[in-house]
Image (tube, rainbow, N blue to C red):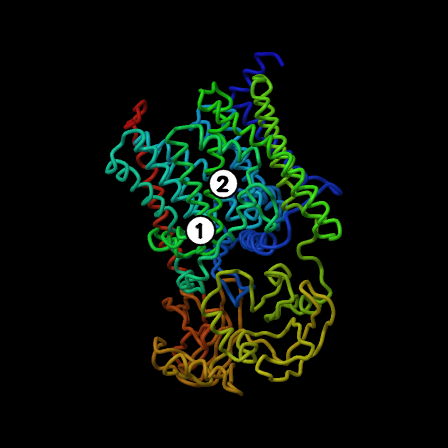
Amino acid sequence: MPPELSRWLRNSAAAHCAILAGLWALFFWRYFAAPPNQVVFPDGDFTQQFFVFRSLAFRELAAGRLPLWTDCFFGGYPFPAARQAQFFYPPVWLSFGLLRLLGYGHFPLLALTAETVAHYLIAGLGAYAFLRAETGRGLAALAGALVFAFGGYLTGYPPLQTGILETAAWLPLLLLAMRRLALHADATSRAIATGLLALMFAAGHPQSFLLCGYLAIAYFLFCGRAAGSPWPALLWRLAPVLLLGALICAVQLLPQAQYLSLSTRSSLPYAELAHGFPLQDLAQLVVTGLVSRWQPLFMGILGLTLALLAATAVPTAAVRFWVVAALAGVLLGFGSSQGAYGLAYWILPGYSLFRGQERAALVVAMSGAALVAHGAALLLGALPRRSRRAVAKAARLLRSMTLPVIVLLLAVLLLARGDAVKWGELPPRFGLLLLGVALAAITLAARPLRSWFPGMLLTVLALELFAANSATNAVAPFETYPYRPMLAALQQDAGTGRWFRVQDDARMNGHWACMYGLREWGGISPIRPRMWMEFDAYAAEDVRFKLLGVDYLVSWKMEPGTREGLPLAAQTLYHGPAPEGDAKVYRLPFTAQRAWVASKVQRPANPEEFWQLLRTPGFDALGTALVDSAAPAGLQPGTGSAAVNSDQPGALQLTAQSSAAGLLVVSEAWYPGWMASVNGGAWQPSIPVNGFVQGVALPGAGTHTVQLQYRPRALQWGAALSLLGIALAVFPLLRRKPGRSAVTTA
């Protein structure tokens, strides 16, 4: 290789970014290839949650409506409050805009795949920029970026839950911004850090955001103290970033906080929150897939060697910081099996809100990538005597491990040959371990070959990570929501314009009704409305069928009946396979009612009486309205009728005829923000009725025009606060005089 080209490849950021982009394309090319080479992300949250939410939002926007409410699951759901929607995340809007420019009327799965894959490039380039700034060496930064972007954490479960991936992808750039903020107290540094915090929160995974936020704050304080800044100055510099970031996030923060307070996640017990890694998952530092499908701690044998070299042979404050951060991440990831989580639960604000403590592996992944970069910088430079001894010991250890690993592999081959499952899993895993140990030993031995060593180091890192992780989330193409004969009658009925809902007894894939043009009672979103859970648990099932307009049932039951043992004279429309097992489709002996005038209004004295009435055999779900003490006085029983003039998600217009000042009941989930206007009058909150649906007070006898709209105050206030936060963050940039230099406090 000509020396000029060699120097350019070693020192040029453009060359390093091109290498990173090329490896990224090599890692993901099959997701965009034509059959038979094409692969896709597995079915699950990726298709049944995030793809469905993208499709719902795009569908509403294409129809000229903001997707504030969706009516196809949970009997109605506040869309912006769902973190899976990622509705305020700018890359989602960029994707929507490009699709509209290309003429799409629906959201294709390939668009979500492209969005997901693009975030790996963001993660890699961001990690390169950050680690180059910290280590001062481009090739070392490239090594760390490879470990972060293609290591076991980001290539494990995060792409299947895009909110996790898309939050974590910006972490290196946030750390870079915090480093700049620690060294420069200028408006640009504050604006960049604030913008990245807001962007990461909008990505839609609060737990990952919290982990990133704590790591970024700790790194900011470390950098500031290392530069000689006093504690008060650092806190004074950090405070506006956090406050402005919270203001900008308000448009998403307020609706989600309100929903969380009204959900099943508002008070989870410590035992449920504290689950984390089993201790045996530490084995996945060296052997992939041994404990579970995922290997979030895996960075490759060479990567682990570089990280350990940095920890033992690079006596710098930055390395000590990353060692402490990695250990903290590991200990927090074990949850209640170690004491660190219990301490964080009580001390760190927000930490007690989230379960799944193994997600602290994100901190380990970032810390590990930083240590790999420092270890690579050590090997790529001139080694002091102490470091030479450490490298020699590491090389000897790797060489001595080779024979035991070979013996271990042979033992695994012998033990697994009689078990087809183990034969398909264990030998490749231990074979990869042997390959990693051998290649790491060869790489360290090749360090004296100065012209070849950098390329060998990067090649071995990439080879080991690609071999372990490239197939983790790659499956053969499949149709996400194919035509199903079992739903033909339901879709035909829905095609007539008639309103009704379906109940699925765990036989369909997630959020299926939204994708088949139907509405369902259930849903798979993990954070569920508390009212939904209580009504589902305490109300009699036949009451639910009538009150929610459930005309069809998809069930494992071979004889139609309610869970209370009430037989139903239902018609069987289908019997055969369903996505989750054998099922029947029943046409229930009811006719869905979208709205009606209550013939009886009752005010139970307490919740126990309330639910007892809803469980009473023969309860008249379409005649009796149970309201609480907050409902307006003067509601009278009467007779009447209701007709629906227009019905869109989040907006209904009805005509009601009543013989008295009664109550119009609408079969839609009640939630704060639903407002009603009668005969063009003032907008008033709707009334929760029968523990789940909503009602509107009619002013007297006669014919009334009723409008119901979802107008979430939390979203309106959040939007106003977000605009204020953006203005406050941008204003100092606009008033800066040209040529004015930043104030440096380092």
Q: Is residue 180 left or right of residue 465?
A: left
Q: CA distance from mark 2 to mark 1?
A: 16 Å
**Tag 2 secondary structure:** helix
**Among all residues in the image, which is located at the extreme bottom?**
618
Please say if 253 is above or below 10. below
Is residue 357 rendered to the left or right of residue 417?
left
Q: Which class describes the residues within 10 Å of circle 2: few (<14), some (14-19), or many (20+)?
A: many
The first of marks 2 and 1 along the sequence is 1
Label ID, residue 365 = 2
* Placement of 56 over or under 188, stated as above or below: below
Q: Nearer the viewer, residue 564 or 723?
A: 564
The mark closer to the camera, 2 or 1, is 2
Residue 583 vertical placement versus 338 (above, below)? below
SS at circle 1: helix
Which percent across, then down, holds residue 271? 44, 62
Circles 2 and 1 in contact, beta carbons < 8 Å? no
Task: Check the picture and name the quadrant holding the C terminus.
Answer: top left
Residue in the image at 63% along x and 14% along y = 1
Residue name at image x 30 percent, y 33 percent: 225
Residue kind at label 1, given as amino acid type: Gln
Which amino acid does the dot numbered 2 rest on?
Ala
Q: Position of residue 203 (x, y in %)?
A: 47, 47
Question: Which of the two residues, 593 or 638, is positioned nearer the viewer here?
Answer: 593
**Depth order, front residue of 241/492:** 241
Q: Is residue 32 visible?
A: no
Labels in figure, total: 2
Report the residue marked by disc 1.
Answer: 207
Sort mark 1 into few (<14), some (14-19) or many (20+) by Cα contacts within 10 Å: many
**Rendered image quadrant of residue 111:** top right
In the figure, residue 352 lies in which quadrant? bottom left
Whole-percent x, y for residue 503 in the image: 60, 71
